[in-house]
Amino acid sequence: MAVDPNLNFNFTLPDQTGIHAALDGALLILNMPTVPYVNLTLDERKNTPSISAERLPYVHDAVNNILPVFPNLASPSIPLARATTLFELVTFVQSVVPKMAELNDRLTDLGINAEHLVYKSMLDSYNTAKQQEGRMPGADVLIAAIAPLFEDQGSNAEEPPIEGPKP
């Protein structure tokens, strides 16, 4: 979906509070002393062998159906009880990660859209103030206040172009 030029929205204060509370609650659980803190490097994330989602049914079948019947085939380094516990963790994590990704994507896109429109509003106001500088009270105040917003903006590093007819 493209940027929505008509976006005019904010979460209600109770909605904002609810979202923060839910995320804070999840972080509180993850920060409990009983939850191991694993912090892999990008290289470790890339190179550590793991199970892709489409292969999980094979592991499920082995852990829950086959190995309990044939315990002599279970891993000598990771006992079946531990493998079962870890597989339950894998299942849980894989059910949560898509929700987190959706939250991240939707909030990021919503934020970028809103930032774009606020930026456009400030650029329009800045251009109006530049056109009215010396003729309209407050133009110099607004220019001084928001000029830094437009610094280092590519070819417009000095200041944004004034749109429309010049005075």
Image (cartoon, rainbow, N blue to C red):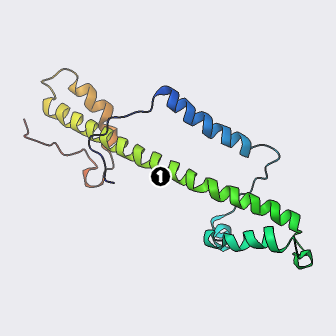
Seen from the viewer's position, the closer of residues 133 and 30 is 30
Task: Residue type at mark 1: give it.
Answer: Asp
**Identity of the residue furthest to the bottom in this view:** 73
Could you tell me residue 93's position as x and y percent?
67, 56
Could you tell me residue 15's position as x and y percent?
50, 31
**Is residue 3 at all visible to an observer of this figure?**
yes
Could you tell me residue 72's position as x and y percent?
92, 78
For residue 163, which quarter of the picture? top left
Could you tell me residue 88's position as x and y percent?
75, 59
Dot 1 crowding, Cα within 10 Å, few <14, some 14–19, many 20+: few
Viewed as shown, does residue 3 lie left or right of 133? right
**Is residue 51 at all visible to an observer of this figure?**
no
The C terminus, quarter of image: top left
Residue at the image position 61 percent from the left and 40 percent from the top: 23
Viewed as shown, does residue 47 lie left or right of 64? left
Viewed as shown, does residue 30 lie left or right of 139? right
Residue at the image position 32 percent from the left and 30 percent from the top: 145
Q: Secondary structure at mark 1?
A: helix
Provide the residue designation for mark 1.
105
Residue at the image position 19 percent from the left and 20 percent from the top: 137
Residue at the image position 87 percent from the left and 75 percent from the top: 74
Seen from the viewer's position, the closer of residues 50 and 117 is 50
Seen from the viewer's position, the closer of residues 48 and 142 is 48
For residue 66, which quarter of the picture? bottom right
Seen from the viewer's position, the closer of residues 43 and 10 is 10
The N terminus, quarter of image: bottom left
Compared with residue 100, is residue 64 higher up or lower down, i.e. above or below? below
Viewed as shown, does residue 21 lie left or right of 165? right
